[in-house]
Amino acid sequence: MIRITGPCSNVTVIHVASGRRLELPTLSLSAGQWVEIDTRPSARTVTRDNGGNASAYLSPASRIDQFVLPPGQSEMRWTAYDSTNTARMRLTWRDAYIAL
């Protein structure tokens, strides 16, 4: 789960090793507003703080279905325009196991 909290705009989240990106070029968040990106296979949603669907903010090249963390360490980066330097990204995950 990825949560971006404003104020910020033009958000991009990058998985460094694979180069996969989730870009939200038209998203604009005021202070305290947030957007949450859920990449779990059972969900794959983008939600605004008001509960609304925000998937329309994803660029056409952003493949939420391919944005997964592989086993082991992963480096994530994010960029956004924020003139206050107070915007934040929170990334949470849980271990996933596949039964044989």
Image (cartoon, rainbow, N blue to C red):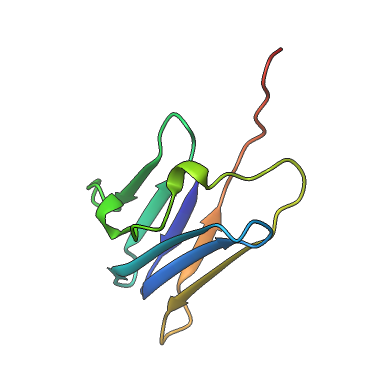
Of residues 32 and 42, the one drawn nearer to the viewer in this rendering: 42
Q: Quadrant of the image for the C terminus?
A: top right
Q: Is residue 92 left or right of residue 58?
A: right
Total numbered labels: 0
Tell me which corner region of the image, top left, top right, bottom left or bottom right, holds residue 28: bottom left
The furthest residue to the top: 100
Q: Is residue 7 left or right of residue 92?
A: left
Q: Residue at x 69, y 59 (%)?
A: 17
Q: Is 7 situated above or below 35? A: below
In this rendering, the answer to whether 52 lies above or below 90 is above
Farthest residue toward the right?
72
Task: Indicate whether 8 appears above or below 73.
Answer: below
- Residue 85 lies, in percent from the top left, at 48, 82
Question: Is 59 positioned to the left or the right of 3 in the image?
Answer: left
Find residue 19 and report its image quarter: bottom right
- From the top left corner, tell me how far across and down residue 88 is, in percent: 49, 67
Query: Could you say which quadrant of the image residue 30 lies in?
Result: bottom left
User: Which residue corresponds to the image point at 65% horizontal and 29% vertical from the top-left?
Assistant: 96
Front position in the image: 21 or 52: 21
**In the rendered view, does 70 fall on the left or right side of 32?**
right
Outermost front residue: 61
